[in-house]
Image (cartoon, grey):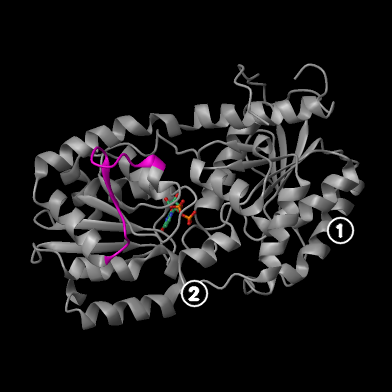
Amino acid sequence: MTAVHEPITTGSHHTPNKPRIAVLSYHTSPLAEIGGPEVGGMNVYVRELCQALGSRGFALDVFTRRSSTVAPEVQPFGPNVRVIDIDAGPAARIDKDELPHHISTFTRAVAAFADEERNSYAMVASHYWMSGVAGIELAERWHVPHVAMFHTLGEVKNRARDTEHESAERIAAEQSIIDAVEAIVVASPHERDLLTNLHGAAAERVVDVPLGVDLELFTPVPKSRARTQLGLRHNETLLLFVGRIEPLKGIDVLIEAASLLSQQDNVRLLIVGGDATAMPEIATLREQAKRLGIYPRVSFLGAVDHAQLPLYYSAADVTVVPSFYESFGLVAVESMACGTPVVASNVGGLATTIIDGETGYLVSPLTPKGFASAIDKLFADRHLREAFGEAGHRAVERYGWPSVADEIASLYQQLLHEHAALPSGV
Ligand code: UDP
């Protein structure tokens, strides 16, 4: 399966007979507040992709497990898009290990919702393995194509760091999804290789489309203005981390790297991300910073509203992405879009989005020393930082939503045509 690159019908808000797509985002809602352990890049991506496709004339119903009692069952979410909360398990946030137990209830309830509304879906698009499991059954029931996106793979996480213990159930489920679906969207060539080499996915069913970034939001703000707006000091050198607080993100490696920098006194490390459930992990990281004698220079800021992040990236001198694995790594692209160089692990999608020695540095092996020496080089040379920042800003054009959404829309149209499910006029 290769995406065709033909112009896309932009579609009005009320396109008649537009194909209706069931988007499955079982374990986390695109409307969830970003920053918690399960709420990150995938939420941002599903939210923005659905809105972009909705404005191109697709009708999308995004099904998610109800995790609170306050949300209405059906919420309109931009042109042609609805988010539908499905009762499956407790209407509360539940432990990640408990989530798989409610997939079959979710699947039955989505089917019942479709029957009740007399809706016929022309395609299933699933995000993450738990949605993929539901997607297999729904696509079979409706006789429609299923396009899956994993975001991460269990086997890959387990191999990336010994702190990870993804279940055999997850890994087996991922294999069944790979074997069942019509297409799999991957965010990087690295993920494509993993799917074909590790899981035997048929290469023609794997489509490589990078994640999109809102380049109108993520744009440089003059550094001094950004710092003033955020109440940050002008005389400090700022190192920034943004992301979910979890071991795979390598924040411990970054803290140790910060303690090894040759220029120490004026450096501040800002750590953005994490909600109340991240507190134990944050406590461990604070202890580490104390032990290394840099505690006063590390600030844990908690989750920051997505729309505020351009100020943080612009205020920073260097953004660090020390992850043990990233299938794409939105944070790196957001930082480059704001003109701030990135020092990142040479893994997964980061190895593609960052141009080593031009828009940032790729570090391997992933040692604190390796990160410290790359950060040192950038801290020592303002002109280098500016040159990298400008190059980064230019390099991210490729990840703007208009072209990314066009590629996904082409793929969807192709799948719909192949399955003769596309109504005339679209
Ligand atoms: N993010 C946010 N506020 C926070 C922390 C993270 O809006 O406090 C967003 C960040 O801007 C990015 C996403 O969460 O869009 C993280 O995506 P990434 O691909 O870097 O990591 P993932 O969560 O997919 O592992």
The spot of residue 80 in percent (x, y) is 69, 34
Question: Dot 2: what SS?
Answer: helix
Is residue 245 found inside the magenta-colored segment of the image? no
| Circle on res. 277 | 2
Horizontal relation, residue 403 to residue 13: left or right? left
Query: Quick one: quadrant of the C terminus?
Result: top right
- Using the image as rendered, state which of residue 29 and residue 99 is in the foreground: 99
Horizontal relation, residue 306 to residue 254: left or right? right
Q: Is residue 188 visible?
A: no
Q: CA gap, disc 2 to disc 1?
A: 30 Å
- Using the image as rendered, state which of residue 341 and residue 299 is in the foreground: 341
The spot of residue 386 in percent (x, y) is 16, 38
For ligand 1, give the image quadrant: bottom left
Residue at 19% in and 44% down = 223
- Using the image as rendered, state which of residue 269 and residue 66 is in the foreground: 269
Q: Is residue 346 visible?
A: yes
Toward which corner of the image does residue 156 lie, by quadrant?
bottom right
The spot of residue 59 in percent (x, y) is 72, 34
Residue at 22% in and 81% down = 290
